[in-house]
Image (spheres, rainbow, N blue to C red):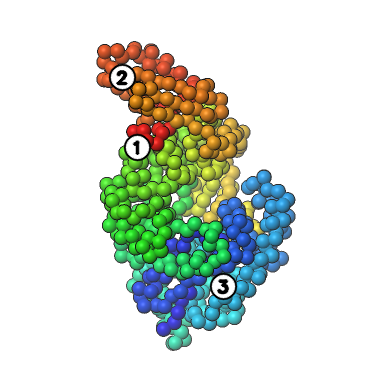
Amino acid sequence: MGRVLLVNMPLANLRWPNLGLGLLQAALTRRGIACDAAYLNFDFAERLGLDDYTWIADHFAFVLGGERLFAKHYFDNALPDDDSFWRDVLLPADPRLSEQDRRDYQRIATHVGPFLDDCMAAVDWPRYDVVGFTTSFQQTMPSLCLARRIKKEWPETKILFGGAACAAEMGIELLRQFVEIDYVFLGEADLSIGPVVEQILAGRGSGCQPAQVSWRAPGVSPEMVRTRADAVPGLTPGARQDALVRDLDALPYPDFDAYFTRLARSPLRAGIDPLLFFESSRGCWWGEKHHCAFCGLNGAELGFRSKLPQRVLDELRYLVARHNVHRANSADNILDHRYFQTLLPLLRDAGLDLQFVYEMKTNLTRGQVEALLAAGLGAAQLGIETFSTPLLKLIGKGATAMHNLQALKWFSEAGIEVKWNLLYGFPGEDPAEYAALGELLPALCHLAPPMAVGRVRLDRFSPYFENPTAHGMTNVRPNRAFRYVYPFPPEVLGRLAYYHEFDYADGRDPLSYARPLIAAGETWQQLGGSVTLRYWDRPDGVLLLTDTRPGAEVFQRRLRGIERQVYLFCDTGRTFEQIVAHVRETHCDASPDEPSLRRMLDTWLAARIAVRADNRYLSLALRTPGDS
């Protein structure tokens, strides 16, 4: 029986194991196929140093800076020059880059060839009949560089490609353009990799070639995987719904042993705080109903599937016990809303001492936020994008400005890491929304700041991409960075690219009206963590607010009686009618008239200790830990 090696190339993150690779290794092992994993991303990082590796992996991710380094090695002089790449791609993405940054980037390029030499020497390649590469996180060109060397030395070795960069048409085009690749998996490979590898290994003894592999094997179809013989012009992927993993509970636990073994022997280990990776669902339940206009996640795998709560708990318990790591990142695109009643209570009571990360919608209640925190939520990734309800409706988010404000406030108050992006430039947006947004953001600077402030992208698989004309987009073309990675015609780049550029059909320039938002967002990022607006609900009936935000009217403010009552009531966004009813219910003998209540609320708005959105008022001060 032959042997398989699954390879995790640069520029994958060093802090966690590759979930897809771990699942596929476990799937092959379950079928009795000997399978190893090689985390060669560590080898490149050890050459560069942790800081340089992280800089290339993170800072240049969306402009393919890491892919470019390896593409230069692969294509030699066939690509445009470095100066053009710097001026046309890197500087526009980050004008703060310096000449020293440029020299550092060019220096890192000199390590590519020696790194590949190291890879060839570090692995006993003849031992493996099949080598599989995963292609997420700037891994495509590094994988192709190594695959070409393997094929040159051992042409009988079968090369498999899969991962995000191989989804649908992109994978087929990679197969057409790169002769190193024998098989490409176009989507979820959990069910197909075993039968495919079994037939490859069986064929090695019978003279079977890739073109002769039967797609009639259980769990395998041409919509899931293509071979070298399929790399013909005009071939397009079909619908892959039958290829999706429907029963996630039937999957094995991921095998992360190779990652933690490699981490343990890395000289960089002291600087790496590892995380576990897990998934409790695939797809997006909201996207099934109303696909967010700019979202290209999931591709054709949008259909939502989730694991049973007990299975999730059992898997996490296994991973924590095996690796003694108590932080975990969820790969889910969205939290299953049913888990509030099922999984979260299990996690709360399990005693795992586990902090986890989830991505979620913002239409939450405070009780749901508290349930997440009690279960061990250590970081939240929120789909905020903007604080304008008309813009949120335009892009199909299924949330309001008040939802976003509440969720950001409550998670910021908890002191956990909060990840979210502030976007602008949605086709068809009303420029008038941005004046109000520019005024709103300075009042929020005590909350967790946005990770990034940027113009909305056009990503493959999104509604924008599928029907740009209907969304007011024209002249769709691959992101310019792809010209500096692949020396191919525009039509080929269009099939390889995930990120695309576009023009606005109405000729607008979003910068002409979004500058106040951008400036306020960047100021917010600079202030992040250094200012506060917080309250203490004292036993003497005084609600004490402290405010250190720029432009604060006073450092301290004391609210008593009805003021205190209303401010606490507005911890959740409330309409004026709800506020009036609450005051009358709690102060029936001394309730103020409605004009007095409006003056009080207007005073708070002017002082920026509260905001008004969607005809609701929200108090902005964060509750001090220990207050209830």
Q: What element carries label 1?
A: helix
Q: What element carries label 3?
A: helix
Question: Which quadrant of the view contains residue 589?
Answer: top left
Q: Position of residue 42 (x, y in %)?
A: 55, 65
Quarter occupied by the N terminus: bottom left
Q: Which mark is residue 147?
A: 3
Does the rendering let one see residue 73?
A: yes
Pointer 2 residue: 583
Question: Residue at left 58%, top 67%?
Answer: 43
Q: Exactly how many numbered labels are in the figure?
A: 3
Q: Nearer the viewer, residue 360 or 374?
A: 374
Question: Residue at left 35%, top 18%?
Answer: 561
> Which one is earlier in the sequence, the residue at label 3 or at label 2?
3
Question: Which quadrant of the view contains residue 125?
Answer: bottom right
Q: Which of marks 3 and 2 is in front?
A: 2
Q: Which mark is residue 366?
A: 1
Q: Where is residue 286 in the image (x, y as percent from the top left)?
A: 37, 46
In the shown orientation, is residue 475 left or right of residue 210?
A: right
How far apart marks 3 and 1 lie (CA) works out to 51 Å
In the shown orientation, is residue 357 left or right of residue 473?
A: left
Q: Where is residue 277 in the image (x, y as percent from the top left)?
A: 42, 58
- Categorize mark 3 by other alpha carbons within 10 Å: few (<14), some (14-19), many (20+): many
Q: Where is residue 18 in the image (x, y as percent from the top left)?
A: 46, 63
Vertical side of 402 occupied by 330: above or below: below
Question: Which quadrant of the view contains residue 486?
Answer: bottom right
**Amino acid type, callout 2:** Val
How far apart marks 3 and 2 lie (CA) works out to 71 Å
Q: Which mark is residue 201?
A: none
Question: Residue at left 56%, top 39%?
Answer: 525
